[in-house]
Image (cartoon, rainbow, N blue to C red):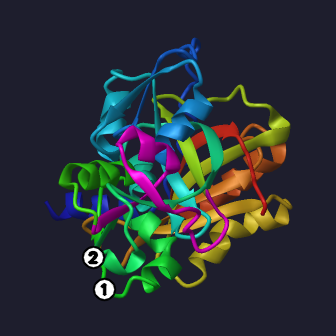
Amino acid sequence: MTTDITSRREEERRPRRMRALRAADPSPPPMSASVAYPGPAGTHTAAAAAALFPSAQLVPLGGFRAVADAVTEARSAYGVLPIESSLAGAVSETHDLLYERDLSIVAEAVLPIHHCLAGPARVGLDAIRIVRSHPSALDQCRNLLARLPKASVVAAATTADAAQQVAAEGDPSVVAIVREEAVALYGLVVLAENVGDSLAFTRFVSIAPYTRIDVPRASAHTAFTFLTKHRPGALHAAIEPFAHAKLDLLRLVSRPLPATPWKYRFDAVVAGHPLDPAVRLAFSQLARATREVRVVGVYEGHEVTA
């Protein structure tokens, strides 16, 4: 028994080899296949899904995990989820689902985000007592909320859910921060336009149960996740190979590991294709410096600067 435990601990201390790329699906589903997104209709994610898959059957589901389940179980060919806001930062749930599930990013879209304040009837701002919206939207509209000192903020699963709830209540003092398309969709009226604090963008990703490798090398981005060894300088040692290779590390996000308090993994994106010699060498060095490395997406990147 003691020998088994010792062997297991020794194994946990050894660096794990970098997992091989999951083979790309030899015949990916057509662009007209069904695409799941966290609904209901009228959200920014619905707009992203339509932009990524203009001919697809879009299927609104009950949340991020429902989308991941539908793709994992092949009930939908793709899923679309937000992964990063230019104002609020990383979308933690999407990062965690990519780590937990056997899913990869296969495409991305970056959309400008325009919020409006809407309700069932026209009222002055001083009459508003409740504002509903998704937490990210609320966070992007702090200046507006500061002008509504009498109003309470109530979080909703999506901005479209907030619109639905406000429409169902029918109380002019209960309003929502929503995408403009949701106003007509749920029979509301616009009380104020462009209520975001500043110009904002959200990055959305399409997920699938395979990893693409047929991405144009010049515009390829590679998303990956890694666990560092628990010692001083471990993170520096992990990302140093990318600097030496003059590769652009576009994003680096830390996420806590479940059931292991105060220990973290790192999710990152590098500009480059994993089969490029410089990228392959950097990943090889990364694997030697970390406990685990896994690629979670190869896709054509779209960087937007304001």
Q: At x 52% / y 34%, what residue is drawn? A: 49
Residue situated in front as seen by the camera: 73 or 304? 304
How many labels sit on residues? 2
Is residue 110 at all visible to an observer of this figure?
A: yes
Relative placement, left or right, of 143 versus 122 is right
* Residue 285 image-quadrant placement: bottom right
Query: Label 2: how many residues lie within 10 Å, few (<14), some (14-19) or many (20+)?
Result: some
Of callouts 2 and 1, which one flags the residue occurring earlier in the amino acid sequence?
2
Q: Which residues are magenta?
A: 173-201
Relative placement, left or right, of 38 versus 30 is left
SS of the residue at dot 2? Answer: loop
Tell me if residue 286 is in the magenta stretch: no
Q: At x 45% / y 37%, what residue is drawn? A: 103
Counting from the top left corner in percent of width and height, residue 65 is at 31, 44
Q: Which mark is residue 129?
A: 2
Relative placement, left or right, of 29 versus 164 is right
Q: Label 1 belongs to which residue?
A: 150
